Image (cartoon, rainbow, N blue to C red):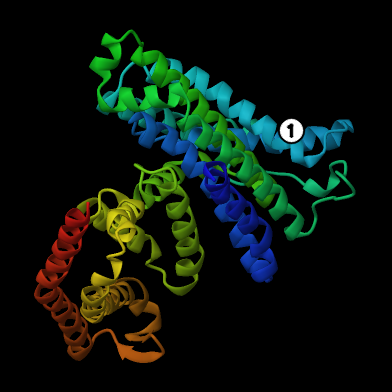
Amino acid sequence: MTMLNRALPWVLLALAFALLPKILTSNTAITMLAMMSINIVFALSYNVLLGQTGLLSFGHAVYYGLAGFFAIHAMNTVVRQGLGVPLPFIPIVGGAAGLFFAFIFGWVSTRRAGTVFSMISLGLGELVAASSLILRGFFGGEEGVTANRTKLPSFLGHKFGPQIEVYYLIAFWAFVCIVLMYALTRTPFGRMCNAVRENPERAEFVGYSTQRVRFISFCLSGFFAGVAGALAAINFEIMNAQSVGAAQSGSVLLMTYAGGAGYFFGPIIGAIIITWLQITLSDVTGAWMLYFGLLFILVVMFSPGGIAGWLMLHQPVWRAGRLGKLAPSYALAAAPMAMMLLGAIMIIEAAHHQLVKAAGDGPAMHFLGLSLNSNSPLTWAVAIGLFALGVFGLRLVWPRISDAWGAALANDKAGA
């Protein structure tokens, strides 16, 4: 029974990878699923550093982007030289490239931890980003480097032209990487990474070199980030300077932290949500980057454990069968929460229209199917009023939520 319980999550994960394209059949949905799978590998590779070893890197896109460029050049070389390497083996090239550069840069950066490591990673990231615009022969300048995956030798009769075939290739590699990274957390080395994260002095006292542990963790993280970069190169058939830039490093940091760096499944949740928001919000509003910044600030302030941490808070209550005691208070908080969010979004959209679009489009703006005037005091009064009422309502309801939590946990302790 224990083996069945251990295998069940992986079976469900494999079924999710296999069946989701059968449910969400549009090309847009399949493309989104492919991007989610890539970002899951990328975020989990970052969590090998942040969540497992306690290393906050500001330049993790270096290994993702450089591996993507090597994968693109490898694809072009296979086509040009007529080599018999099919597309499914290209991620190995990306992983090797990520491991190579992680070995070089990690040898320098992992000699220190904490703030010093973060600053070194930031400097290395900016160095590579600047080089991407100078070394045009390798990086292709601002236009980047392109490839055609369909020209590579076929694999089991597949040329990987249709997006669905590319998705299943990406999903296979994503599943393999997820299993391997989870297995890493269960090894003695994974436990030692946690020890270095929690108490490096004690880890030194028991005979382990914290620098060596950080270095090995850094190399493994670079390998999986390289696989993600190669999968991105296969999916998009282009790599440009943005893939090694600070925005890409910030994106994976947001995915990992918002999802919950303290839990293995946290970056998976973060990658799914952030990827979905990146695709959908960019089509809805021009201020979508602002929403990401606010999301990161809110998570840091009110839920440092991320979404996974908030979910895991409910685990003891759920196990005790007391989760229903929290439902009434949560339902009571839903209305003021919706009002607060509606007011905040209305303020952001009105301010964005006023600052960016009003000069060309005039003061008229569309919000949730309504035509509003961004210059009108009434528009601002309604937006601010909704936000203020939502905040006030949450303050009134919050004691009910606290009492419900107290009752659920008290019953849980009494039952124990």
Q: Quadrant of residue 315?
A: bottom left
Instruction: Reply above or below: 329 against 278.
Output: below
Instruction: Reply above or below: 371 against 411.
Output: below
Q: Quadrant of residue 288?
A: bottom left
Callout 1: 10 Å neighbours few (<14), some, many (20+)?
A: some
Q: What is the x, y in percent for residue 152?
A: 84, 42
Q: What is the x, y in percent for residue 23?
A: 66, 70
Q: Is residue 187 left or right of residue 238?
A: left
Of residues 244 and 141, which is closer to you in this image? 244
Numbered disc total: 1
Q: Residue at x 60, y 33 (%)?
A: 67
Of residues 137 and 284, which is closer to you in this image? 284
**Disc 1 residue type?**
Ala
- In terms of secondary structure, where does tag 1 sit? helix
Instruction: Reply above or below: 195 against 376.
Output: above
Q: What is the x, y in percent for residue 95?
A: 62, 31
Q: Residue at x 85, y 50 (%)?
A: 158
Can residue 133 be seen here? The reply is no
Can residue 384 be seen here? The reply is yes
Q: Residue at x 47, y 67 (%)?
A: 282
Q: Is residue 43 left or right of residue 332?
A: right
Q: What is the x, y in percent for residue 115?
A: 26, 28
Q: Quadrant of residue 409?
A: bottom left
Q: Is residue 282 left or right of residue 240?
A: left
Of residues 317 and 224, which is closer to you in this image? 317
Q: Which residue is mark 1?
A: 74
